[in-house]
Structure formats: structure tokens, C-alpha cells
Amino acid sequence: MPLTTHYESLYIGGSWVKPKGGEAYTVINPATEEAVGEVPVGTAADADAAIAAAREAFDHGPWPRMDWRERAVILQQFHDVLVARKDEIVQLCVAEAGSIIPVASIMQFDMALDGLQYYIDQIQRREFVIPSSVSAHTNWATGGETLGSTVKVYEPLGVSVGITAYNYPFFLNLAKLGPALASGCTFILKPAPQTPLEAMILGEIASEVGIPPGVFSIVTGGVDVGEKLTTDPRVDQISFTGSDKVGAIIQAQAAPSLKRVALELGGKSAMIVCEDADLEQAAFAGVVNFTNQCGQGCILQTRQLVHNSIKDQYIEMLKAMASQVKMGDPADPDTGMGPLISAAQRERVLAYIEQGKSDGNSLVYGGSIPPGLNRGFFVEPTIFDCPSNSTAIAQEEIFGPVVCVIGFDTEDEAIAIANDSQYGLSGGVFSQDPGRAYRIAMQMRTGGVLINGGGGRLNPSVPFGGYKRSGIGREYGEEGLNEYLEIKVIDFRAA
Ligand code: NAD
């Protein structure tokens, strides 16, 4: 089946329906500024229809009542169709989100599919009814000896809404669809306005594999759609990935109807490079940490804290490696760094670079639109040597290819600088002493720490999420599935 990039309808309640509004959004390839496709812009009325369908499917439909194993069979088909269509989906991630081919193929696609497979396996293996001990005791209500027991039952939470960001859209959409559908919730996806196509393809596959009507809907659009989905009392749970600013708004919007809210938010993560680090390994990871997805990654370690005895050498290595990163169209397999998502994001990043300079940081590499790349939303890999951790470029999430290198003299100082952040998503330590690296990792106030670059791939069986303004709740692992489940306890008289 050829890849669709022009849609006139939205996938709502199990059918492709004409949206209530008349607007269309042209998806732009951020590397070429050419049109990639077109989708209708959803409205609050479309969100209302998706909520009604999801509520009906949850309250009266087969999906939440199905045996876990039956759901797993359907989701496995969903997974397998995605795998069969990998090449076209990867091309879409390249054209729509500006991901270079390895990022599209591994980070966006393979890791998303690993996660979906994890949830499918988890619901088949997990014992959802766990008997607790059977005991005889005096019955408080009726007196006399009673033999009783209790079971703990996991049930799907209800109508779930996933709202996602633009940076790794295919991955983020599946990170919400997987646990929502595996748990038996019904699910509405609102993708980022800039990247709707990586969501729409999921609707095609849902209808192909026979996910029942209303179980999964997609509503494109912006704030009005997001507001409707997060305020409507028929929705039970929100899983949001995006900025801390919008996360806080969503938490407030969801509060009056007391929805459960999981928030995966921004970061300004620190990578600590000790004087005993393998410097080449650290600098290589250092460059990847501000050039991956053109710096538009929540977990990227864009504050690099380097022992003062090796800082100059580290910066020289970063500069040399950054100069080898080929910028350009990510469809070219030789490209190492693609564009930012939009002209607006490029303006924002360039404004931060100007502010970085005027706040007294020294720009040691990059800082401009690359010569010859005026078409597409490119910015050079940019390295600042920062005298302190307190200026805007060290404290705020820039979401562009900009790194702050900050010196330190002692381990305690490095940890204090790392923790001097409103965020707490990720962290890194480079040291050839594993005990030391672990000791430092234990003191970092973040949801995850990579030692010497870590294993290099998301492990879906462990939870992912942030401390402080980086979020509430977790994705992946048992904890990720629990975000979509209620726990019921049934106490019964055995004899
Ligand atoms: P954003 O917060 O601007 O938008 C995210 C989504 O929220 C979009 O779909 C948007 O339409 C929607 N939205 C905006 N206002 C809303 C409202 N009032 N009600 C409901 N929905 C609303 O984020 P972005 O610019 O798309 O993405 C970048 C941000 O995402 C960065 O901060 C990045 O760190 C974060 N992010 C976090 C993770 C993570 O797992 N922690 C992963 C990827 C991205």
C-alpha cells in the first residue's frame, strides 16, 4: 500500500470522517520547505465526536472487556503491519520531522516498536489477578470465624488522551498508543500540529487490523482541540509529552474533572565529564547530545560540565568533531544533522544564541545559519564556553543545537551545578572509575543517568520520566502500564 500524505478526513470512531471545520494544514519538509502532505485541521467539535465515540466504546464496547490475550493478538497484528511498512514510515519521519535516517530508523521506529512489543508481551505475561493470603479471622460485621481472601484486579482506566510533541513524533505517538490500547483503555491521539502525518498512518493500520470502532481516534489541531480533550469530564486520563509550560496548563485544565495526568516534559540535562574520563568517548557523546534531531530532544545533555583540568582539551575535541557533522537534507544518508522543525523554532534558537553572547558566555563554535543552507531551517552546531550555570542559555531549554560547556574543580561542585536546574530528566557521567561514576549518578536529581553513554538504546522494560519540572509519572516498564490502569480489590468470603 503506498504511503498516504494527503488526507481529507480524520480517523474518528473507527471511520474516516469529514472534519467539522474547513481548514487544511500543509505539512512542510523542514529541510527543503516543500510541501510533504496535507491534513484537515481538527476542531473542538471533532474532539467532541472522538470523545463520545471513545466513551461509548469504553462503557459498552468489547475492547475493555476482551481477554488480555485477545487484545494482544490484535495489537500484535498492528505491530506486524507497522514493521512491514517500516521503510515508508522511516521516509515519512525524515520528510516530516527532519530526522536523519539513523534517528528515523532506530530512535523513531525501532525503539517505538520495541516499546509496543514490550506492552504486548507484558499484558500476556502479567498476572492481572493476584490472590493474597487466605486467612481465618473473626468477622467484624457478623462475628464468628470466617475464612476469607482478597484479590487485586487491574482494570483499564477509561478514556485516555495522548497529546504529543513534534520532535520524535512517531516514537511519542506509539509510546502512548501502546500502553493505552494494551491496558484496554480507549484512546484519542492529538499529535503536534507540525507533525500530523506520523499519527494519521496509525489510523490506517488500526482500521486494517480491526481495532473496534471508537477504541482509537486521531484528532489533529492545536490548542482548541487540546483544551477540549483535557477539560471534558468524559475523559479519564491524559498522557502528555511536551513543554513544561504547556504541561502546567494541561494539569490545570484537567484539575476540575480530576483526571489522572502523566506529564513527560522538557529538560536541560547535565553530563559530567570527570578528569579520569575517556575524553574521546565523552566528546563523541557530547557532540551527539546537541546535534541529535538538531538538538530538539528532551533527554539531550546540553549542559556539559567538564573538569577544569581537561576543559580546554574537551572543547577542542568538541569543535573538531562538530566540524565533521555534515548538515543538510536528512534524506541524504551522509547527513549527520538535519534542520529544526520550523522557521519560528530557528528564530527562537538564534535569539538564544544572541542572548548567550550578550550574557557574557563565549561563543567558541557555530552560532549562525550555515553558509549555503538558507533553504530549510538550519542552524550550525553551536558551542558556548560558559563561565557560570546561571545565564539563560544554561538554565532554559533551547531545543536547538546549542551546548553549554561549564568547568568545575570538585565532584561536589559538579553535582551541585548539575542539580542547579528546574529540570530533572536525564543526566550523564563519564569516568573510568565505575564506582565513582555510580556514586555521582546516585546524587543526580534526575529520572535517569547514563554512565559512559549508557547502553545506547531505550530499554522498554524500565521506566522513563523526570523529576522536578521534567514531569510527573513514567512511561515504559510496569510503571508505564500502571498509568493506564485502575486497581480494584475484591474481598470475599471463602467459607
Ligand atoms: P508544546 O508543549 O508546545 O506542545 C505539545 C503539544 O501540546 C502539542 O500537541 C500542542 O498542540 C499541545 N498543546 C498546546 N497547548 C495546549 C493546551 N492548552 N491544551 C492541550 N494541548 C495543548 O511542545 P512542542 O514544542 O511540541 O515539543 C517540545 C517540548 O516537548 C520540549 O519541551 C521537549 O523537551 C518536550 N518533550 C519531552 C519528552 C519527554 O519524554 N519528556 C519527549 C519529547 C519532547
Image (cartoon, grey):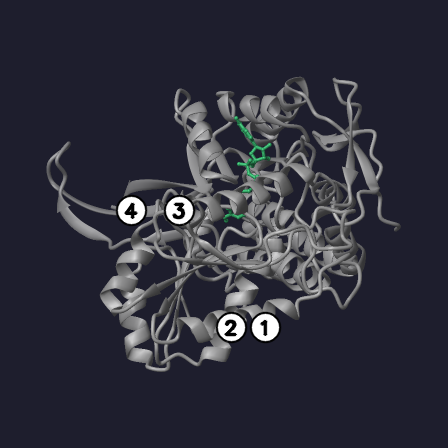
Mark drawn on residue 484: none
Report which residue position mark 2 lands on.
Answer: 316
Tag 3 secondary structure? helix
Identified at 67% across, 21% down, the residue is 43
Q: Nearer the viewer, mark 1 or mark 4?
A: 1
Q: Position of residue 91 (x, y in %)?
A: 79, 55
Mark 1 surroundings: few (<14), some (14-19) or many (≥20) residues within 10 A: some
Q: Are marks 3 and 1 in contact (CB under 8 Å)?
A: no
- N-terminal of the pair, mark 3 or mark 4, is 4
Closer to us: 309 or 52: 309
Q: Are marks 1 and 4 in contact (CB under 8 Å)?
A: no
The amino acid on which the numbered mark 2 sits, given as a three-letter code, is: Glu
Rounded to the nearest angstrom, the CA distance separating label 3 from label 4 is 50 Å
Q: Please say whether residue 442 is visible from this viewpoint.
A: yes
Report which residue position mark 1 lands on.
Answer: 320
Q: Please say whether residue 456 is visible from this viewpoint.
A: no
Mark 2 surroundings: few (<14), some (14-19) or many (≥20) residues within 10 A: some
Closer to us: 22 or 159: 22
Report which residue position mark 4 lands on.
Answer: 150
Rounded to the nearest angstrom, the CA distance separating label 3 from label 2 is 24 Å
Rounded to the nearest angstrom, the CA distance separating label 3 from label 1 is 26 Å
Mark drawn on residue 395: 3
Tag 4 secondary structure? strand
